[in-house]
Amino acid sequence: MTTPSVTVNGEKRPVVDIEPYVTALDWLRDQGLTGAKEGCAEGECGACSIMVTRPDGDGRTRWTALNACLVPVLLLDGQEVVTAEGLGKPGALHPVQEEMAHRGGSQCGYCTPGFICSMAAEYYRPDRAPTDPSSNGHQAADHEHGPNGFDLHALSGNLCRCTGYRPIRDAAYALDVPAADDPFVQRCATPAPTAPATRVRVGDTEFVRPADLAAAVALLAERPDATVIAGCTDWGVEVNLRGTRAPFAVAVDRLPELRTFEVGPSEIELGAALTLSEAERLLAGRIPLLDQLWPQFASRLIRNGATLGGNLGTASPVGDAPPALLALEATLVLAGPGGEREVALADYFTGYRQTAKQPAELIRAVRIPLPLASMVAFHKIAKRRFDDISSVAIAFALEVAEGVVERVAIGLGGVAATPIRATATEDALRGRPWTADIAREAAAVLGREGTPIDDHRASAAFRAAMLEQSLLKFHAESAVPEGKAS
């Protein structure tokens, strides 16, 4: 047994007699740091945003914004956290705080500390490069990036209830480059803290962070009732809104064996515990279909914590990653007490919230075969453009040679008890010309794939219609115009 601790605003604080389900937000507020608020308790409003240190390669650190309402404080054992109170103080405001005040970015102030932390994490992003610093925030470089390189998606998980977004955007676009002697900049030049092995028992509950993969699978074999946690973007909602209490929680988010990244001649391997933001940075555009997925997957705040392994492990039929990975014909590496085995993602989902993974196994990595198909698209149909659960998600990956579909894989979400491959539609396209007539025939087949249902997000008829229209849209946007070479 150990006594966990978290360094908050430069001060090391012990975490004593805390159950695994107690969130960082509740713990911080009990410490008197009440800037972060609970707005939604499910990671959709960002009022609880804090900054944490995370590895950024080559022995450096990246300041990363996270939802404190979802992350158990024990998951932050040995880590460094900065809240809005730690960025600046009256008379010595942080540049982000100063711009928010100067440009009227706060009214009631409830959401402001969360905005401040998310904005500060983007302020310190190492590859944020000004495009037109002379504009002083009055003219954006494009509709989602400021002239100072500020990416508005950094604030996509933060909601304002009364001020309106223009002054907040103006404050973000007015930020200059951080000074070289800024202590937060200097902190980025040194390594992020490692995650220590931890075991804490409080009452009938226990939290364990194993030292390595072997220890993790041994624990799972010993305790089949264990709850495996990583980014907690799903489990945190269960804790907050449904009162879920895990008697035995095993944290795998920082296991080195689950954080691999390899690009080989025949495949790309992504460790299951890499966050979506980390995967996006590491891939650096190598997989165009995933580049279409990332911005539509919840918000940047969620992607900073959520993992591919977690998204696949929950086996939700409306998860955003499975359709894209099905279209990429991905496989999963499952690690257990007897070693590793590789399972095609198409065979992984066995029923509603059920998978081929055994209780003592972990998803160690996702493997994506190469070469990739050259024509891809990811369509997400939801009530909001960002930060919403999909009604239907469709991913396409086609290879067309001399006008004929040579290779095709289509992944679907939201139309069956599990994510599925649209095999009938694939058969209707494979080996046939990529023409409007064939696309219409195949779209009719796609509209009959799966077993869509009526629920509060969409009707079965709407889902079927969206499947059909999605293929027609994909063809219209990817077909070679008549008279041009294929």
Image (cartoon, rainbow, N blue to C red):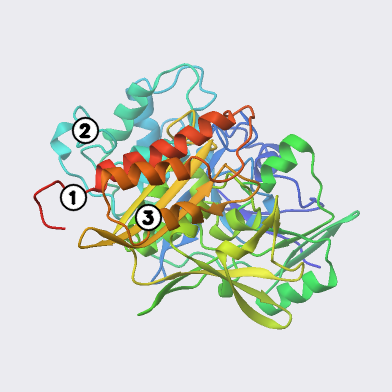
Look at the numbered disc 2 and give the secondary structure of its residue: loop
Q: Residue at x 64, y 46 (%)?
A: 234
Marks 1, 2: nearer the viewer: 1
Categorize mark 2 by other alpha carbons within 10 Å: few (<14), some (14-19), many (20+).
Answer: many
Categorize mark 3 by other alpha carbons within 10 Å: few (<14), some (14-19), many (20+).
Answer: many
Q: Residue at x 79, y 50 (%)?
A: 18
Give the percent coordinates (x, y) of residue 177: 26, 46
The residue beneath circle 3 is: 429
The residue beneath circle 2 is: 140
The residue beneath circle 1 is: 480
Q: Nearer the viewer, residue 196 or 450?
A: 450
Look at the numbered disc 3 and give the secondary structure of its residue: helix
Going from the N terminus, do you reach mark 1 or mark 2 first?
A: 2
Q: Which quadrant: the C terminus?
A: bottom left
| Circle 1: residue type | Val
The part of the image, by quadrant, that contains residue 41 is top right
Going from the N terminus, do you reach mark 2 or mark 3 first?
A: 2
The part of the image, by quadrant, that contains residue 3 is bottom right
Give the percent coordinates (x, y) of residue 483: 8, 49
